[in-house]
Amino acid sequence: MILSGKEILNKIKKKDILIDPYDNKSLNPNSYNLKLSDELIVYDEKVLDMRKKNKFRKIKIKKDGLIIYPGKLYLGRTLEYTETNNLVPMLEGRSSVGRLGLFIHVTAGFGDVGFKGFWTLEIHCVQPIKIYSGIEICQIYYHTLRGEYENYKSDKYQNNSGIQISMLYKDFK
């Protein structure tokens, strides 16, 4: 089952969910809107290789915005740090953002119980679009969990502090 907005707030009070910073205006009937930080990463490699750490560079989103272009993958992150206990967090783009042809996650909308960190966003667009930091770009929602479980543990992505490139190369070691 998906938690209602009121239940998300209850779970925050019970410390099963942490969203920092939290703003009550971002709470929806069954989700919470997360904002885009002011930094992006783009890969410098023409061909990405799964077996290696690909070269990348950081781009700042200035106050007056940044135009991004089709044919390029941009990695961003949420402004908010989240922690989730006893629940499965999920991430989706906002419909208002999608209706502009901006997609905020290609395949990674599924979170794990026990995840702690910022969400890395896989951003691409269908036509050039000007984006801004601080915009509510996606929404997090929560599923209840049945049965015994173990919290997410990863030397790749847990307790991150910023945008994270793919660490798939570690699976080849």
Image: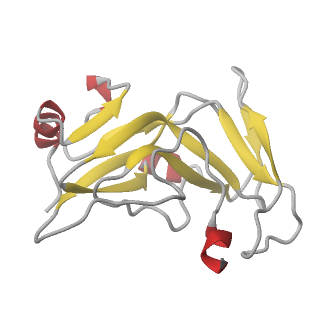
x and y percent of residue 61 in the render?
71, 30
In the image, taking residue 54 as reference, residue 110 lies left or right, namely left
Quarter of the image for the N terminus: give it: bottom left
Residue 110 percent location from the top left of the image:
39, 63
Res 102 seen here: no
Q: Quadrant of residue 169?
A: bottom right
Question: Which is nearer the eye, 144 or 25?
Answer: 144
Name the residue: 32% across, 43% down: 83
From this viewpoint, which residue is outermost toward the top?
A: 63
- Using the image as rendered, state which of residue 150 and residue 28 is in the foreground: 150
In this rendering, the count of numbered labels is 0
Picture quarter containing residue 17?
A: top left
Q: Residue at x 14, y 47 (%)?
A: 4
The structure residue drawn at horizontal position 73% and vertical position 24%, both measured from the top left corner, is: 62
Q: Percent x, y for residue 114? A: 30, 53
Image position, residue 105 (x, y; %) = 53, 58
In depth, the one of 78 and 33 nearer the eye is 78
Residue 150, placed above or below residue 29? below
Q: Quadrant of the C terminus?
A: bottom right
